[in-house]
């Protein structure tokens, strides 16, 4: 079932980055190997055929692999940046909630239209930051991809301390 969702993400050229805890989460690498997703059904079927016949690159995050789903442990630095970039969005959501409780419909509508641009900019900044992180393009913030050890898998726990470098656990 999850693989079907991963396939849809890949065909739509959408990656999913979920921080479930302060420095732990999940990543679905949904980048399309075809470079685009806005297309017709005939082209999509052709793309799938090329993948089945191994005539294009692999979908995996690591070149030459098909691994698209990861558990991740990220440095606190990444979480701090996330909170900093998303602070305007959080503040907008909080003020919008307060206004809806107060019943200020017209004022709420004016504020929403003015805040949409700030929200869009925050999401754009976050998208660029996460893309740079995943492409190893940030000098002070990087990650490794590795398998969990047998004991980590058995106990469903990670033993590695995360300081400046995150870990994406394959498998």
Image: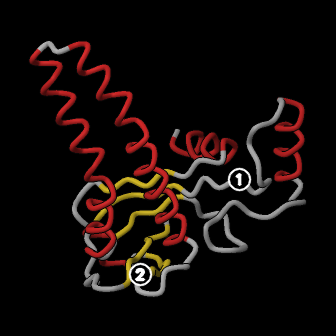
Q: Quadrant of residue 17?
A: bottom left
* Residue that mark 1 sits on: 32
Using residue 39 as the reference point, say whether residue 116 is left or right of it: left
The residue under the point 41% across, 86% down is 140
- Give the total of numbered labels: 2
Name the residue rendered at 30%, 76% in the picture: 75
- 45 left or right of 20 in image: right
Q: Secondary structure at mark 2?
A: loop
Q: Is residue 159 above or below residue 114?
A: below
Looking at the image, what colour scheme do you see?
Answer: secondary structure
Q: Nearer the viewer, residue 151 or 47?
A: 47
Q: Residue at x 36, y 33 (%)?
A: 114
For mark 1, does the 10 Å Cα neighbourhood hold few (<14), some (14 to 19), or many (20 or more) residues? many
Rendered location of residue 33, percent (x, y): 75, 57
Element marked by disc 1: loop
Q: Badge 2: how crowded within 10 Å, few (<14), some, or many (20+)?
A: some
Q: Looking at the rendered structure, which numbered label has been put on residue 52? A: none
Between the C-alphas of marks 2 and 1, the distance is 25 Å
Q: Which badge, 2 or 1, is on the more N-terminal residue?
A: 1
Instruction: Name the residue beneath numbered marker 2.
Output: 141
Picture coordinates of residue 165, whole percent (x, y): 38, 83
Q: Nearer the viewer, residue 131 or 105?
A: 105
Viewer-nearest residue: 58 or 87: 87
When asked about the image quadrant of residue 120, the answer is top left
């Amino acid at each position: 079932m999850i693989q079907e969702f991963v396939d849809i993400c890949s065909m739509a050229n959408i990656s999913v980055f979920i921080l479930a805890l302060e420095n732990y989460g999940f990543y679905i690498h949904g980048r399309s190997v075809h470079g685009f997703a806005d297309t017709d059904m005939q082209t999509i079927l052709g793309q799938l055929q090329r993948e089945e016949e191994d005539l294009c690159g692999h979908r995996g995050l690591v070149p030459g692999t098909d691994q698209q789903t990861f558990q991740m442990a990220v440095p606190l630095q990444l979480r701090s940046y996330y909170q900093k970039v998303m602070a305007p969005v959080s503040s907008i959501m909080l003020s919008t909630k307060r206004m809806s409780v107060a019943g200020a419909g017209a004022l709420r509508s004016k504020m929403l239209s003015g805040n949409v641009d700030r929200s869009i900019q925050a999401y754009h900044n976050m998208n660029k930051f996460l893309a740079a992180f995943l492409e190893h393009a940030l000098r002070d913030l990087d990650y490794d991809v590795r398998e969990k050890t047998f004991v980590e898998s058995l106990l469903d726990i990670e033993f590695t301390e995360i300081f400046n470098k995150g870990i994406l656990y394959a498998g």
